[in-house]
Amino acid sequence: MPQHTDSFSLSNVDQPTRNVEIEFNGVSKSWGENHVLRDLNLSVTAGEKVSIIGPSGSGKTTILRVLMTLETPDVGVVSVGGDILWDVKAGVKPKETKKMRATRRKVGMVFQQFNLFPHMTALQNVIEAPIHVLGLPKKEAEERAVELLGLVGLKNHMSHMPHQLSGGQQQRVAIARALAMRPRVMLFDEPTSALDPELIGEVLGVIRQLATTTDMTMLMVTHEMRFAQDISDRVLMFDKGAVIEQGPPDQIFASPEHERTRRFLSMMLDR
Ligand SMILES: Nc1ncnc2c1ncn2[C@@H]1O[C@H](COP(=O)(O)OP(=O)(O)OP(=O)(O)O)[C@@H](O)[C@H]1O
């Protein structure tokens, strides 16, 4: 497990009081006959870096979207940092209570598309939520944003508009924007899939840096197999709405047990 360092202000993130940061308990989700999550049980430890791999349409993104409360499970319990986000059987849904808002804020997400506000500079994109959602004073939000834009290598691009930035730079702004909310859990949904090949490395470099220098819990859906192998504590192989195999990357990549995993990896690693 990477050691925490004080290299930047994410070190101020509250320490989790429990060892389990993310928990899915018996979570299922269907769209009609399409069973996208099937009785998912998953536990992620605080600080753990977990990659989710698997074929297209197997439900990987849906896991992240449930954690962001962007999708509603049909059944099951989901908690973050010990606080329940979903308890569908008990009828608890994420209402806009103060506590629920605080629980949701523990989780940040970087999407495939960067989704920056097109009429705002990079800096404005990053300070927007800390000011309007967290209520931070502008000066403090700006200091935080400057630090984070420096962290993602965009110190000299703070006043650029999104259209003046490359896809890789836009995605790095999106990462800084998510970090500005000081989440304890960061979700990445194929963050390089919309990028030209030559821009992928710069975004993976930033994620790698976060993985190795912060104690945030990270859950990454990725098709970058070598990257997953390199930075993960654990890899989950997902297929048809369920984890069919999981373990340390060396085990999953060097000696997968499941035939489906073997076929998937040989296809992905041959690309
Ligand atoms: N809003 C929706 N309505 C109906 N079906 C949906 C919806 N969102 C996702 N699905 C379906 O759920 C299934 C799982 O989707 P999901 O995006 O979680 O898969 P994935 O493993 O992340 O795929 P990919 O690697 O292609 O992104 C797919 O069959 C998808 O078509």
Image (spheres, rainbow, N blue to C red):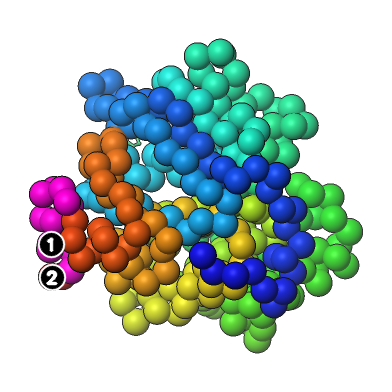
The amino acid sitting under disc 2 is Asp
Instruction: Kindly identify the residue that appears in the image at 52 percent across and 31 percent down.
Output: 78
**Could you say which disc has been placed on residue 270 in the image?**
2
Ligand 1 within 8 Å, label 2 CB: no
Determine which residue is flagged by label 1: 267
- Return the x and y of residue 234 as percentages of the image width and height: 39, 56
Q: Are marks 2 and 1 in contact (CB under 8 Å)?
A: yes
| Image quadrant in which the C terminus is located | bottom left
- Return the x and y of residue 101 as percentages of the image width and height: 71, 36
Magenta segment, principal secondary structure? helix
- Return the x and y of residue 25 as percentages of the image width and height: 45, 28
Q: Is residue 240 visible?
A: yes
At numbered mark 1, what does the secondary structure look like: helix, strand or loop? helix
Q: Is residue 161 visible?
A: no
Work out whether residue 56 or residue 235 is closer to the camera in this orientation and state it: 235
The amino acid sitting under disc 1 is Met
**Could you say which disc has been placed on residue 71 in the image?**
none
- The residue range painted magenta reads 257-269
